[in-house]
Amino acid sequence: MQETPLCLRVGHLLHYTMSDYNTTDFTNPSTFILMGIPGLEAAHIWISIPFCAMYAIAVLGNFTILFIVRREPSLHKPMFYFLCMLAVTDLVMSTSTVPKMLSIFWFNSREISFRACLTQMYFVHSFTAMESGILVAMAFDRYVAICNPLRYSTTLKNSVVAEIGLAVVLRSGIVTLPYPFLARRWPYCRTNIITHSYCGHIAVVNLACADIRISSYYGLFDLFSVTGMDVFFIAVSYTLILRAIFRLPTKDARLKTFGTCISHLCAISALYVPDFCTSLTYRFGHNVPLHFLVLFDSLYLVVSPVLHPIIYGVRTKQIRGRLLQLFTHKKT
């Protein structure tokens, strides 16, 4: 295991040591110890500053999106309902990890119970998959709006939007269930120190003193069958959208129509690019420094929730106008 030597090297920087928590006779430890950003413990206070700022922006931004859509009747449309689903997902995903990270950075509060660790694992992976599913739904929304605009109101009725949202939640919840169950079945007889800032699936099962190929294979299955299929459906949607855009008679019409997709394309990039990079690097990037991997992975969970409200707040005319109107009224 790569984790144990690293823990030994940085153990003198911690209040916790390997000898305090390493045992040889437990199968399911009562607690795990989260290292934060291993190798950068001396800089935890400085690292906490951008994490805290981004988390505050994410919470404020996503709550603002929810508030504006709720208050403005003209925004009660499928596109903005999906945006609200994305905002809720971002709030839960960041809140399930960042407060614990900050407690590690600020107070050296590294302990997390075994059950809480499995719960955090479930929430992280479930809401990441949920966010991916919502982006597919938003791609479908753009496809109908551009390729079949006359049928938009009849195709995406409120009941259909609710059914799509329920399907996304059920799919994400069911697909993610094996993660904590697989992690729970392995014996942890070497160490309970997780060289990470939160309880990710691979970070936890790598501590098991057993053959964890099932967990690893299921993680790859989830990556390629769920996220991969979502990317495929989004790619098909945008192929059809671009074909419809290029058929428009004027350049201005093409640019204006494509402009309605920019926000969604930015949201897609903010989720999938770091997701694929992180997943593949963890499995195959053995020469990448661990502290870089952990820092990048931790940032990934807060960058998307920060970027999404900014992207849609700046790019979406209705939200930008309502937000400016809200601040103007407050000043007057």
Image (tube, helix red, strand yellow):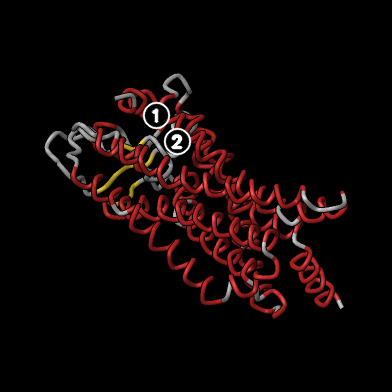
Residue 248 locus on image (x, y percent): 80, 53
Q: Secondary structure beneath disc 1?
A: helix
Q: Amino acid at mark 2?
A: Ser
Dot 2 and dot 1 residues touching (CB under 8 Å): yes
Residue at image location 61% in from the left, 75% down from the top: 154
Residue 311 locus on image (x, y percent): 70, 54
Give the label on residue 279, or none.
2
Residue at image location 33% in from the left, 57% down from the top: 174
Residue at image location 23% in from the left, 35% down from the top: 208
The answer to whether residue 20 is seen in the rendering is no
- Residue closer to the observer: 192 or 231: 231
Q: Amino acid at mark 1?
A: Arg
Q: Which residue is mark 1?
A: 283
Q: Quadrant of residue 3?
A: top left
Residue at image location 51% in from the left, 29% down from the top: 292
Q: Quadrant of residue 47?
A: top right
